[in-house]
Amino acid sequence: MEAHLSNRTRLIQGLYAANIVGAGVPGALTTFAPTLAESVLFWSPQDPTVLSILGSIWLAIGITSILGLRYPQRLLGVFVVQLIYKTIWLATFALPAIVRGTFRPEAWVMVGIFLALIIGVIAIVPLRTLLGETERKAVPQAPASSVRGTR
């Protein structure tokens, strides 16, 4: 990578690399080898339609993250999508299942991965940057005498 990149940009690229491995690889496997993916990645048989949608989404996140290595600031939206869907899953599925005592032990791996990405994004990417705002430069103010009409 180029020497002029900031430490924060390098950390963001690390998040993209984690997405490539953690979402892109499973997404490609789920999309192109669903039978193998089902035996390696999932704990029980999955509906093929649902599995293909999940694989497509993960693969899209992986491909976007490959592009994010080159354009780290421009593709931060992939993290917004992940923050939203991971938080929804944790709040509506994982937490209620944990409280009811029906959460499968092997699903704790997903909880750890999801929390790691959520915490990583929040810690590394400023919210202002994540939402696409840029630093605004102060516009120099004209001296008061030039504001009034002079004759």
Image (cartoon, helix red, strand yellow):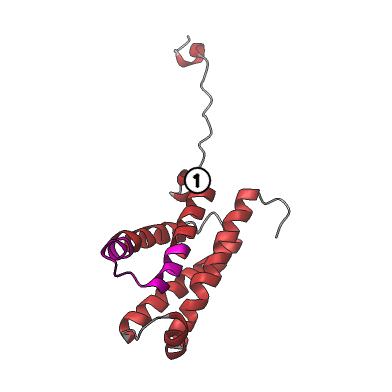
Residue 11, percent across and down?
60, 54
Q: Is residue 116 visible?
A: yes
Residue 97 x/y as whole percent: 29, 66
The magenta segment: 92-112
Image location of residue 146, percent across then percent down: 50, 15
Give, as a three-letter code, the residue at label 1: Pro
For this orientation, the residue located farthest to the front is 101
Say what secondary structure mark 1 lies in: loop
Vertical order, 149 against 140 (above or below): above
Figure check: 82 above or below 102: above
Residue that extends furthest to the right in the rendered view of this protein: 3
Q: Residues within 10 Å of mark 1 (few under 14, many from 20)?
A: few
Q: Where does the N terminus fall, quadrant-wise?
A: bottom right
The residue under label 1 is 126
Q: In the rendered structure, does residue 67 fall within the stretch colored magenta?
A: no
Q: Does the segment drawn in magenta span residue 94?
A: yes
Q: Please, which residue is most extreme toward the top here?
A: 151
Relative to the observer, which residue lies in front, 1 or 99? 99
Relative side of 17 to 150, left or right:
right
Residue drawn at x 29%, y 70% as measured from the top left: 102
> Does residue 143 sit above or below 73 in this rendering?
above
Residue 71 shows in this picture: no
Horizontally, residue 92 falls left or right of residue 81, namely: left
Q: Is residue 57 above or below residue 12?
A: below
